[in-house]
Amino acid sequence: MVIEFVYAAAILMIIGAIGGLLQTRPIDKFLMLGVLGDGLISIVAIFGYLDVAMASSFMTFVSIIILMIGLIRVLEIRKMRGEIG
Amino acid sequence: MEWIFLNEMVAILIATVLAWLNFVIIDLWMGLPEAPGVRGARVIGRSIEKREGDLGGGYFSGNIVCSPDASAGTLLASCGYYGFGGPEGGLIAALFVYFGNRMCADPGYAGTTGALAITFIIWITSHFGITPNYFIVGIVIAILTIQGLYHPLSSKLIGKMARKMNRKVIEK
Amino acid sequence: MIEETIVSCIVIYMVLRLFITQNRVERMPYLNVINFSVAAIITLKNPCPLGAITSMVYFIAATVGSNAIAFTISKIKETKHGD
């Protein structure tokens, strides 16, 4: 039996979604969001929609950068108020 | 299992060894285990050292994760050679790796060197029957052995090779 | 055909390992292997010039995104420990 690419992409998406559900901290959720985005881009590319895959990969990268800036800003504000350390 | 051929397995094995040697030697020569290039590489290197690994090998793995280096150059050059059907794909891949290096604020030239070197190697071995798609599978298996199996053992191997080439850890 | 099996097995093994481990920093190299193999999948399935360009754009974007995740992990460790 040949394990095709579609099965690997489907398992990437399922484990990315379940992992994002079960993790508690925001930084762990971002890692699982990265895995989910990878699975989505690969399943789109396997079926032949290459320009959709290129635009989707660019948007995943921009969204991760924006979420990171937000998380760092929240940490700085919490530290300034004295809720950490 | 009639879809397994012996000469395909031999070709994948040869391509794996060539890709592993290409990216490890060029990265060690460019001084990757010496210092962390960006901040993310430092935390990965320290974590591998805490789990009984080598600090030089840890910085090596951290630099591979955070910035395009010779392993990225090898992968993209083989993809370009396979897609374009000729050596011009390798040159386009070197351009993309150069843009990626500048986006990560990395002033090195490890990625472009790796891409151009593997383009030359693929151009020679394509006359003997090892087509570029075997090199694509080969670089994925090579990066799996360095970063996916067991971090302390592979970092100690990289540290030993780095000391043999006189690349010590400069910055803590 | 043999290439499909090898790359798919590598992806499934790395994803399961990433799901199981608890250490946050140990997950970053596993994510990097997944990025390599997805870039290989895109080119192996579409052997045309646009497939190669898509694979290059995806890989550069994924590497810079992984750099951002590692930077945030180092910022969180610095805030908590006060280094």
Image (spheres, coloured by chain):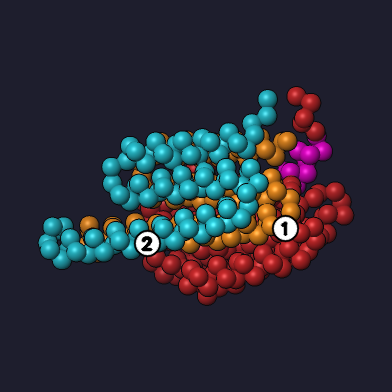
Chain colours: A cyan, B red, C orange
Q: Residues within 10 Å of mark 2 (few under 14, many from 20)?
A: few
- The residue depicted at 74 percent of the width and 47 percent of the height is B134
Amino acid type assigned to the residue bearing label 1 in the image: Pro
Give the image location of residue B70, x and y in percent. 61, 62
The subunit carrying tag 2 is A
Gap in angstroms between the C-alphas marked 1 and 2: 31 Å
- Is A24 left or right of A10, judged from the image as shown? left
Q: Main secondary structure of the magenta part?
A: helix
Task: Note whether B70 is above or below B3 in the view shown.
Answer: below
Q: As displayed, is residue B145 above or below residue C75?
A: above
Residue at x-position 77% and y-position 31%: B4
Of residues B76 and A36, the one nearer the viewer is A36
Residue C67's x, y, as percent? 44, 60
Say which mark, if any, is on residue A66.
2
In what quadrant of the picture does the C terminus of chain B appear? bottom left
What SS does tag 1 mark? helix
Residue at the spot of label 1: C49
Q: Residue at x 37, y 61 (%)?
A: A66
Q: Quadrant of residue C12?
A: top right
Q: Which mark is residue A77?
A: none
C36 with respect to A64 (left or right): right
Residue range corresponding to the magenta coloring: B6-17
Whole-percent x and y of residue B58? 46, 56
Q: Residue furthest bottom?
A: B107
